[in-house]
Image (tube, helix red, strand yellow):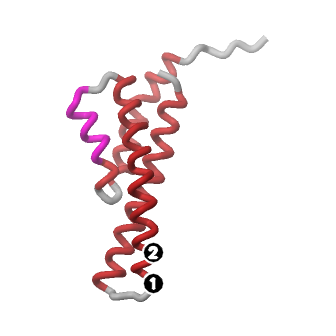
Amino acid sequence: MKKSVLTRYRVMAYVTGVLLVLLTLGVIAKYVLDMNGAVDFTRVVAIAHGWLYVVYLVFAFDLGSKAKWPVGKQLWVLLAGTIPTAAFFVERKITQELESKVAEDSPAVVKA
């Protein structure tokens, strides 16, 4: 497995996670605190998170298929983008698990 597959998953996990936390804060500001600007903020963040979550799904599925994960683990990683802060924890666990596999598959760099 190439390192780029893991890297693009990691980037999208963080992007999705940050947007979901911002969306959660926006919803709290909109419905609980009744703040004026929260409606537009929540709408923009919700749209961005929705589209980028689809990209996250594609990259996470690609990573899982190349890592040959069972279906349950694949679903666990895919759903991490829907629970605030879960993407950060799942990304860290997956990265620790796969870094050795990526290092094994990478050709050794020989300096002349």
Residue at horizontal 25 percent and vertical 34 percent from the top: 73
CA gap between label 1 and label 2 equals: 6 Å
Q: Tell me, yes or no, whether the two marked residues, 1 and 2, touch with CB atoms within 8 Å.
A: yes
Camera-side residue of 8 and 36:
36
Q: In the visual, does 63 lie left or right of 5?
A: left
How many discs mark residues in the rendered view?
A: 2
Q: Main secondary structure of the magenta part?
A: helix
Could you tell me residue 64's position as x and y percent? 35, 30
The local secondary structure at tag 2 comes to helix
* Amino acid type assigned to the residue bearing label 2 in the image: Phe
Please tell me whether residue 95 belongs to the stretch shown in magenta. Answer: no
Q: In which quadrant of the rendered image does the C terminus lie?
A: top right
Residue at horizontal 52 percent and vertical 36 percent from the top: 7
Residue located beneath label 2 in the image = 41
* Amino acid type assigned to the residue bearing label 1 in the image: Gly
The local secondary structure at tag 1 comes to loop
Could you tell me residue 102's position as x and y percent? 48, 24
Magenta span of residues: 70-79
Q: Quadrant of residue 75?
A: top left
Q: Quadrant of residue 69?
A: top left
Q: Is residue 42 above or below residue 95?
A: below
Could you tell me residue 47's position as x and y percent? 42, 62
- Numbered mark located on residue 37 in the image: 1
Q: Is residue 43 above or below residue 101?
A: below
Q: In the visual, does 37 lie left or right of 82?
A: right
Residue at horizontal 32 percent and vertical 77 percent from the top: 28
Q: Is residue 68 above or below residue 88?
A: above
